[in-house]
Image (cartoon, grey):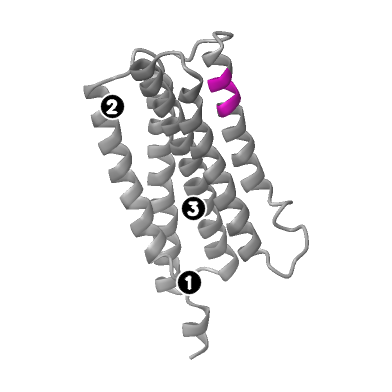
Amino acid sequence: MEQDKKRINVKDWIITSTTMIGVNLTILALIWQAAPPQGIYTATLFLMLSFILFINSVSANSKANFEVKSGNATEEKILKFVSFAEYSFGLGFTLIIIGFSILSYEYLLDFIGNELIVLIIPSAFLITAWIMIFIYNSINFSGKPLKGIRSLKRNLWMIMELICLIIIILDFFNLIIIP
């Protein structure tokens, strides 16, 4: 059937987003049991914002799924919900990466002290995330030269993560303090 070919499958994204909600809440509960001296409020803020974005991703994907099943919505409307869910998920994931970077830095700083090695884990964590984004873009935009580099949303997320790393470095050298 023609409609079966056009069916938009969002079940995997609903499951993934729901899983991220559970992970997020678990991490929040755990970090507050043994909070680092600094950074707990900032990390909590990022994790709570990501929580909202993952809930929105589940809602938007569920709405797209409902619209597909009802057959009353246009493909354009369904794709808008799917796109909104994708942006929500991506931004939520970016905020989790930022929150984890701050937490790993603060926990190491508390455990090891002001040693240069403390910067390795958040740096390696963020660089690994950037490599994954680059690989994803290469696969997603294969055959479209420079399209992956021009992906506004992923570039914005990488810039946010780079700003996080800069803030961590500035905190390490006591130029600012992460609350």
The residue furthest right is 145
Seen at 40% across and 73% down, the residue is 69
Nearest to N terminus: mark 2 or mark 3? 2
Prevailing secondary structure of the magenta residues: helix
Label 3–label 1 contact, CB within 8 A: no
Q: Disc 2 and disc 3: Cα gap in Å?
A: 28 Å
- Say what amino acid the circle numbered 3 marks: Ala
Which element type, helix, strand or loop, lies under badge 2? helix
Seen at 74% across and 58% down, the residue is 147
State which mark lies toward you, 2 or 3: 2
Left/right placement of residue 75 relative to residue 37 reads: right
Height in image: 38 above or below 108?
A: above
Q: Quadrant of residue 107?
A: top left
What label sits on residue 8 in the rendered view? 1
- Say what amino acid the circle numbered 1 marks: Ile
Indicate the position of residue 9 as horizontal and vertical percent values: 44, 70
Which residue, given by chain and number where applicable, does mark 3 sit on?
85
Which residue, given by chain and number where applicable, does mark 2 sit on?
31
- Say what amino acid the circle numbered 2 marks: Ile
Q: Quadrant of residue 76?
A: bottom right
